[in-house]
Amino acid sequence: MNGAKIFAVICLAAATSVASFQILMIFRGNLPFNTLVPFIGINGAVIGGLFYLGIDAIGANQPEGQVAKKILLIRDKAGRVLSISRAGGDSVSSAFPSKKPLELPAVDRKGQVIGLSKTMIALGLVMEIFLSFLLVSGTFTPLLIVQTESMEPTIMTGEMIWIRGVSPTDVRVGDIITFTLPQTIAIATGGAEAQTITHRVVDIIYNGDKINFKTKGDNNPIEDTWTVTSDMLVGRYEMQVPYIGPIFTTLKTPMGIATVLAVILLVVGLPEIKKYGGFNDV
């Protein structure tokens, strides 16, 4: 057994062991699920990485694909293929000295399966990281881009912010919260549709077991005319995500959309251009 095989066996065995341990912790452990979320996220990344390395080592250990029999394409002056011959390889080639036989590699089915497995693991890792981020954030909308100047200079227009989902009982005066303003209230205050707003809490109103909030934008002269109820709360502002917000804002412009489309066309079309641009008579 060579080094690549040994490395592959170690990686796959380690990934299986870590995965088994994580399953036991989830279903047999005594810790609350919320406490396990960061642990699950880190373990998931480790498991995926080990599986990827193991499968990659298996792929690196595969022999090179065998070369298929030589084939000959006979074309007319317009470049149309008149016939294709596989039999007789060299003897057929010698009958047409101006034509060079084309060698095609045999289809490597095992290599295709390994490549597909690596791709699926990589996609799974991306999804696992994304879901872990949602779980840690405690909300399905953890990242938002501020659209107005109402919170300047604390939060500048166009900046991306990270929101963490919290219980209304954890909110304090002075916290910056994000909430959804229902369409009925938005229309009554001059808006056209439901809005997601990030403002600072200036007062907390307790009404029995219900908690409501009065808010105000740092850059606004007066408090908001509405009262934020607990069911409108999305989360509490944690931090700004530097540099990302302006990029997304630019991508929403016509020039940004055109740039994205151009990049997609290049990525998708360039391999085809190279493929067809490399055609030569054989």
Image (tube, grey):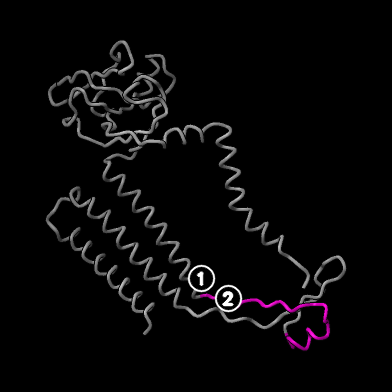
Q: Quadrant of the C terminus?
A: bottom right
**Residue at 74%, 79% in the rendered image:** 101
Check residue 112 in the rendering and tell me which mark sits there, or answer none.
Answer: 1
Q: Quadrant of residue 219?
A: top left
Q: Quadrant of the N terminus?
A: bottom left
Name the amino acid type tagged 1: Gln
Q: Quadrant of residue 154?
A: top left
Residue range corresponding to the magenta coloring:
87-109
Name the amino acid type tagged 2: Val
Asked whether the beta carbons under mark 1 and mark 2 sit within 8 Å of each other, the answer is: yes
Whether residue 199 sits left or right of residue 168 in the image: it is right
Badge 1 marks a residue whose secondary structure is: helix
Q: What is the distance, in whole Å, between disc 1 and disc 2 at their CAs?
A: 9 Å
Out of 262 and 182, give the one closest to the viewer: 262
**Residue 79, horizontal then vertical, whole percent:** 82, 67
**Residue 61, horizontal then vertical, whole percent:** 44, 78
Q: Residues within 10 Å of mark 1 (few under 14, many from 20)?
A: few
- Residue 92 is inside the magenta segment: yes
Q: Which residue is mark 2?
A: 107
**Residue 262, horizontal then vertical, whole percent:** 61, 44
Badge 2 marks a residue whose secondary structure is: loop
Whether residue 274 sits left or right of residue 156 in the image: it is right
Q: Quadrant of residue 95?
A: bottom right
Which label's residue is closer to the chain start, 1 or 2?
Answer: 2
